[in-house]
């Protein structure tokens, strides 16, 4: 990855980390109590106690990832155009995503992600299955913002956009694998956008 990508990602990560630590520090006990009460119906005592603490930490981590996805969606336009001009100089920019639309698309994907995450918490403790479920959930978070950001810039024809979007889920899942690697997880959203950019523009 180029220095522009690395610099962009670390700026995004710093902002996301700042906005994650503060609320989680303040509301840790409230989130812990909510998750513990949610797990009461599961007939496993260790999951109701230790599992609640792990799930609360995981919730904070998920919130961090959500913020990185949101900020990437809002501020990646300039970087994507620069990368497109570098690798596909003859490709014109055909549109421009709006901040409001970017925020709305990412907020919707984030809400779906968080709801599914809460519903799937018991499954996350099952070896292998839990990791596969989490990988799918991360792809839910990344997929729609990626389609919107790249598609709005470079795909004017709706039919072409529809065809290109067919591989968006696979691309989102591949990018989501970064979330299993400390530090590299902050690259997942922009990596998905870069992969989709090449998918869209490569003939």
Image: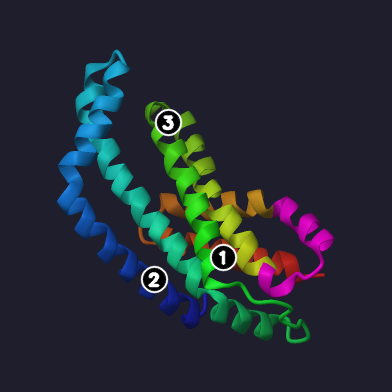
Labels 1 and 2: the sequence-earlier one: 2
- For marks 3 and 2, give the CA distance: 28 Å
Q: Identify whether 52 is placed above or below 21.
A: above
**Would residue 141 be visible to someone looking at this image?**
yes
Are dots 3 and 2 in contact, CB under 8 Å?
no
Measuring 28% from the left and 63% from the top, which residue is drawn there? 19
Q: Which residue is mark 2?
A: 12
Q: Position of residue 162 (x, y in %)?
A: 78, 56
The secondary structure that dominates the magenta segment is helix
The stretch in magenta equals 152-167
Image quadrant where residue 55 sits = top left
Name the quarter where the C terminus is drawn: bottom right
Q: Identify whether 118 is placed above or below 11.
A: above
Are dots 1 and 2 in contact, CB under 8 Å?
no
Q: Which residue is mark 3?
A: 119
Does residue 159 belong to the magenta stretch? yes
Element type where label 3 sits in the image: helix
Image quadrant where residue 51 sits = top left
Q: Is residue 12 found left or right of 81 in the rendered image? A: left
Are dots 3 and 1 in contact, CB under 8 Å?
no
Q: Identify whether 101 is placed above or below 94.
A: above
Measuring 30% from the left and 26% from the top, which residue is drawn there? 38
């Amino acid at each position: 990855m180029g220095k522009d990508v690395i610099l962009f990602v670390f700026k995004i990560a710093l902002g996301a980390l700042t906005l994650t630590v503060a609320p989680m520090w303040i509301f840790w006990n409230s989130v812990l109590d909510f998750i513990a009460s949610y797990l009461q119906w599961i007939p496993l005592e260790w999951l109701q106690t230790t599992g609640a603490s792990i799930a609360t930490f995981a919730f904070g981590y998920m919130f961090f990832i959500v913020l990185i996805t949101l900020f990437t969606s809002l501020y990646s336009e300039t970087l994507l155009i620069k990368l497109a001009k570098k690798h596909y100089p003859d490709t014109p920019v055909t549109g421009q995503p709006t901040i409001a639309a970017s925020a709305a698309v990412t907020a919707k994907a984030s809400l779906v992600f968080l709801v599914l995450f809460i519903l799937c918490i018991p499954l996350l403790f099952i070896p292998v299955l839990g990791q596969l479920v989490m990988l799918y959930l991360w792809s839910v978070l990344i997929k729609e913002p990626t389609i919107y950001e790249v598609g709005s810039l470079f795909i004017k024809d709706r039919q072409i956009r529809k065809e290109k979007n067919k591989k968006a889920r696979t691309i989102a899942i591949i990018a989501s694998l970064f979330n299993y690697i400390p530090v590299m997880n902050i690259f997942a959203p922009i990596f998905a956008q870069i992969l989709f950019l090449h998918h869209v523009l490569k003939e």
